[in-house]
Image: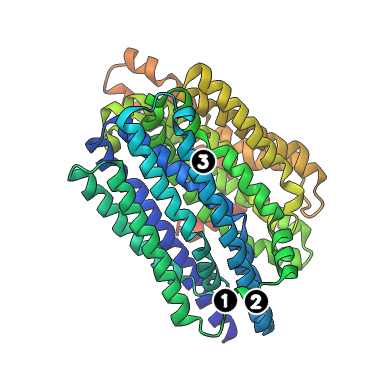
Amino acid sequence: MNRGREFFVFAKNAAANIARGGASSIVALLVPPFLTRSMSPDAFGAWSLVLQMGAYVGYFDFGIQTALARFVAHSTERGDLEYRNRVASSAFAILSVCGGMALLAIVALTVLLPDLFHQLHGSLLKDSRIALLVVGGTLAVCLPSSTFSSLFVGLQRNEIPAAMISVPRLAGAVLIVLAVRLGGGLPAMAMVMAAVNLSSFLLQYLAYRRWITSLKISFALVSRSVVRELVSYCFSLTVWSLSLLLVTGLDVAIVGAYRFGDVAYYAVAATLVTFFTGLFGAVYGALGAPAAVLHAREDRPGLARMVASTTRIGMLLLLVTGVPMIFWARPLLRLWVGADYANHASPILQMLLIANILRICVSPYIIAMISTGAQRHIILVPLLEGVVNLVSSVIGGYYLGAIGVAFGTLIGAGVSVCGHIFYTMRRNTAIDLRISSYVWSSLLRPLLCAMPIIALSLSWPALSRVVPGLISPLLAALTSVVCLYLLWSFALTSVERQKLGSRLKLG
C-alpha cells in the first residue's frame, strides 16, 4: 500500500513538472511567430535583450529554492516542524535580501544600457529602459515568492505551484500577442509581463495561506545557524548557476553589444535550442532516483552500467532528433518565423544544436555524480566551460558577429566533454566506469552511425546544386534509413535491442 502511495505521489509530481515545463514550452514556441511577424527585427531584438537581462534575476536565487525543498522534505519526514519553520523563514529572509540585490542590478543595467549596447538608441533605447526596469524590477520584487513554491515541492504538492505559475504564464503570452497586435510597444509588453509576475506572486502566497496552515514564516524565526547551513549547501549549486550564466545567459547580450542587428536572429535560434535541451533535461532528470538507490546499495558496477546504457540511448535520441533539426534548419525556421529569420538564423541554429548535443551527451554521468553526493567534485569543469565559452564568444562576437558567439558556445561545449572525460572521470571513485569503454560504446559508436546523414547535411548546399531535384529527397531518405539501421544494429547492445524491441512489440 505504501509503495502504491509513493508511486502515485511520484507520478502526480512528475505530471505536474511536465505540465509546468509544457506551459513554458508552449509560450516559447507559439509566441515568437506572432512577434516576428508583427515587430521589426530591431524591436524584437530589443525585447529579447530585455527578457534575457530580466532573467538574470533568477540567478540571484543562488540555489535557495532547491535547498529549501530538500530541507522541508527532510524535516517533514522527521516530524521536526519547528526546524521546518526556521528553515522556511530563513530562506524567505535570504531571498528577500537577494531580491534587493537583484533590483539594484536591474537598475544598474538600465542606467548602463546605452553603454553596453551602442547601437541601441532613440525611442527604442527609451522603450527598452522602461521595459527592462518594469520586467526586471517585478521579477526582483517577486523573488521571495519562490519560497512558497519550494514549500509545496518539499511537501510533494508540485501540482499547486505548477498551476499557480503556468496559468498566469499562458494568459500573459496571449495578452502580449494581443498588446503587439493592437500596436503596443515594449512598455506595453513589459506591463503585461509585470502583471503576470505579480499575479503569480499573489497566487502562490494565497495558496500558501490556504493549504500550508501548519507552517509559519516569520522574520522572528530566522536562525543564523540555519542561514549558514543553507548557504553552505548552496555553494555547489551557486557555482553551477554561475557556469550556466556564462554558458547560456550572456549570449544574446554579447551579440547585442557587437551586432545589435543580429540579436533577433540569434534569439529565435536560441529559443529552439532551449526547447530542445529542455526536453532532454526532463528525460535525464528521471535518472536521479535510480542512481541514488544504486549508490545506497553500494552497487558501483550497476551504477556504471546504468550510466553507460543511458548515455548510449541518450546519444541515440540526441542524434535522431538533433541531426534532422540541423539538416532542415532553414525550412524549419521558415515555417516557424518566416523567410527573413530563416536566412539569417539557420547557421546559428545549426551551430548551437551541435554545441548542445556535445554539452548534454554526458548528462547521465553528471546526474549520477550529483545523486551520489559528489557534486563538489564536478564543479570545476562546468566553471571552466563557462569561462572558455564567455571568452570565445566575446572574441567570436567581435570578429564574426552572431555566428561567432555560437562558435564560442561550440568551443565551450568541447571543453566540457573533454574535461569530464579526461579530468572528472579519472578522479572519480563513486562510479566504477571504464573510461575507454564508455567513450567508445556510449559516445563514439552512436556518432559513427550518424556520420552518413551528418556528411550529407554538410555537403547538401553544394549537392543540391548538382543533383537533380527529385534525386535529392530520395538520397536524403535513403541515407536516413541507413543511419537508423546502423543505430539499431551497431550502436545498441543485444540486450538493449531486446528490451527496446519487447517494449515496442517488435521482438
Depicted 477 relative to depicted 382: above or below? above
Depicted 455 relative to depicted 288: above or below? above
Disc nearest the viewer among 1 and 3: 3
Residue in front for this viewpoint, 406 or 148:
148
Q: Provide the secondary structure element on which disc 1 rests.
A: loop
Q: Provide the secondary structure element on which disc 3 rests.
A: helix
Outermost top residue: 466
> How did the renderer colour the structure?
rainbow
Taking the image as shown, residue 105 lies to the left or right of residue 132, namely: right
Q: Residue at x 44, y 61 (%)?
A: 18
**Number of residues whose C-alpha sits closer than 10 Å to that of mark 3, classed few (under 14), some (14–19) or many (20 or more):** few
Q: Position of residue 478 (x, y in %)?
A: 39, 31
Q: Position of residue 23 (x, y in %)?
A: 37, 57
Q: Is residue 372 visible?
A: no
Location of residue 466 by image quarter: top left
Q: Is residue 216 visible?
A: yes
Q: Residue at x 61, y 52 (%)?
A: 310
Amino acid type, callout 1: Ile
Determine which residue is flagged by label 1. Answer: 217
**Number of residues whose C-alpha sits closer than 10 Å to that of mark 2, classed few (under 14), some (14–19) or many (20 or more):** some
Residue in front for this viewpoint, 231 or 339:
231
Amino acid type, callout 2: Leu
Determine which residue is flagged by label 3. Answer: 108
Outermost bottom residue: 1
Whole-angstrom CA distance, mark 1 to mark 2, is 7 Å
Amino acid type, callout 3: Ala
Q: Earlier in the sequence, mark 2 or mark 3?
A: 3
Residue 221: numbered disc: 2
Residue in front for this viewpoint, 496 or 397:
397
